[in-house]
Image (cartoon, rainbow, N blue to C red):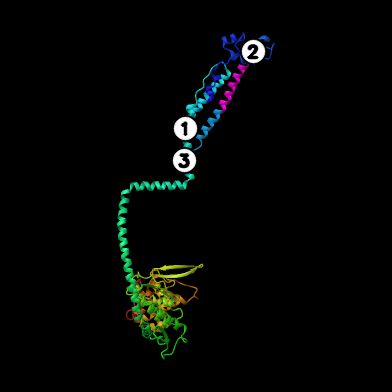
Amino acid sequence: MAFEESPVLAKKVVGKEDIDIAGLIRRLGNSDWVREGLNFAEGAGSPCPFCQRALDAELLEKLNAFFDEAYLADIGEIARIEEAYRTLSDVLLNEVDAALTSGSPHIDVEVLRPLAERLRSLVALNQRHIERKRKEASLPITLEPLHDAIEEIAALIERANAETTKHNGLVDNLTAERRALTSEIWKCLIDEKKGIIDSYVSEKAGLDKAIAGLASGLEGKAKELATAQGVLAELEKGVTSVQPTVTEINNTLSSFGFTSFKLATAGEKEQYYRIVRDDGSDAQETLSEGEKSFITFLYFYHLIRGSTTASGINIDRIVVFDDPVSSLDSDVLFIVSSLIKRILAEAVEGNGRIKQIFVLTHNIYFHKEVSFDPKRQSTRRTHETFWVVRKVDGATVLDGYEANPIRTSYELLWAEVKNPDRSNLTIQNVLRRILEHYFTILGNMDKDAVIAKFEGRDQQVCASLFSWINDGSHNFADDLYLAADDTTVARYLAVFKKIFEVTSHGAHYAMMMGGEATIEEPSPDNSPEIRGSETLVELSPSAGGVSTE
């Protein structure tokens, strides 16, 4: 600071030299004491601030003359320096403190803090020197220089400001800086991997030449292929005819015994179809909706083996049957399902151009017929999947199944019989429905005819079974009910199996059971064995339980 070189600080500020009391004051060196005491002098005749006697007017005048204008000017300059130094030092220290507390990542606080403490100590020391000079003006003082301490702090702050400016520049030009950084990174990578890159470029050039050669060869081959295909198309025009399709469709109708109509060729070149009755009359106007759907299916059936163009017969294809029996009668339903199953078999074996087939239908009976596969019972068919499409809240949902989800109620009844965790509360109704469906509805054999197949006490056991299942599935009026236990159910399941055996339908029982589950045979000492005319246990359905003889 400039205050450090102020001459008034190094000067001995004293009064006027040509006053007779000046020698005494100078000899005693108490001008500061005299000036300070003079402030308490109230005027001539008042108590002297130095000796407490009446103050002589002449002495007061000499004392005032000693402290002339020059002296007072120096005293004022010292006071001004003191005030200015205090103000400027406060500003300087506040700026240093602000830098310490700024939190800037570019300021090394550990370095700046001791520099700030050093500067604060020097400022405090100089302030005490100036204060002493103000009180003792005749005492020369020298201020401690602050230049070096300020320069070190300023240099540190300037470096931080430079880093901040650089960072702000990066932020302001982020896109350009990122581009420049990316360029530098690639340049570094290229320099480090120059050998690998040169090798790649050399090999790529060789491969490009090879590819160009192959492309040129392919282009020539493509031209040759186009020429050959044109020749083939011209040749196919001369041999292509709808007559083989007509013959094939008529053979299909005949093989299934369908004689309502047949196909014939029409047109001068016989390239069109015509639907006729057996007497040769045109059937176009008299076809029913079912017959129209059927002939449409037959045309599609043969179209998927050929093409609508002469040059498209060798293209691989995916076939979709969308509800092909929506309006057909039952006879045609089985014909259509049989034909589709032929296509399914060809696709599985991979013998033709059909690579994948989708069958969509709303008809449960058609689905059951077209999806029937006896091999599926023993072997998982990995080439097929089953899906159910549902509409849920306006959205289409597809649910996949590992096996055919469509089963008849008759199959579900047998599934309950096979289930080892079957319910004892419902098994009576299940057995009744199976026996009624198979023997009464399908076989036209009532329960009495079935019971008649047994002899002696065996008839009683069989009759007991029918009474038991009827009582358990029909009787709702009884106030008392006793649930059948596992032993009772096992006994009657054995009799259920024996019914199929004695009526020569054991093969049906074995087929429906399928080996997936076995019925536990009751123990010999309480089982309803049927052998000759002897029975070990009599089952009494009227009592709802078991009684032994």
Name the residue beneath numbered marker 2: 65
Per the model, the C-alpha gap separating discs 1 and 3 is: 16 Å
Per the model, the C-alpha gap separating discs 3 and 2 is: 65 Å
Name the residue beneath numbered marker 1: 155
User: Residue 434's image quarter?
Assistant: bottom left
Residue 80 included in the magenta stretch of the image: yes
Q: Quadrant of the C terminus?
A: bottom left
Provide residue 420's location: percent of width, then percent of height. 38, 69
Q: Residues within 10 Å of mark 1 (few under 14, many from 20)?
A: few
Provide residue 470's location: percent of width, then percent of height. 44, 78
Element under disc 2: helix
Name the residue beneath numbered marker 3: 166
Residue 317 included in the magenta stretch of the image: no
The three-letter code of the residue at mark 1 reads: Ala
Element under disc 3: helix
Q: Residues within 10 Å of mark 2 (few under 14, many from 20)?
A: some
> Of marks 2 and 1, which one's residue comes earlier in the chain?
2
Q: Main secondary structure of the magenta part?
A: helix
> Of marks 1 and 3, which one's residue comes earlier in the chain?
1
The three-letter code of the residue at mark 2 reads: Ala
> Of marks 3 and 2, which one's residue comes earlier in the chain?
2
What's the residue at 59%, 21% (across, down)?
Answer: 77
Tell me if I can see residue 528 in this picture. Answer: no
- Give, as a single range, the part of the protein colored magenta: 64-87
Q: Residues within 10 Å of mark 3 (few under 14, many from 20)?
A: few
Q: Is residue 297 above or below residue 392?
A: below
Q: Which mark is residue 539?
A: none
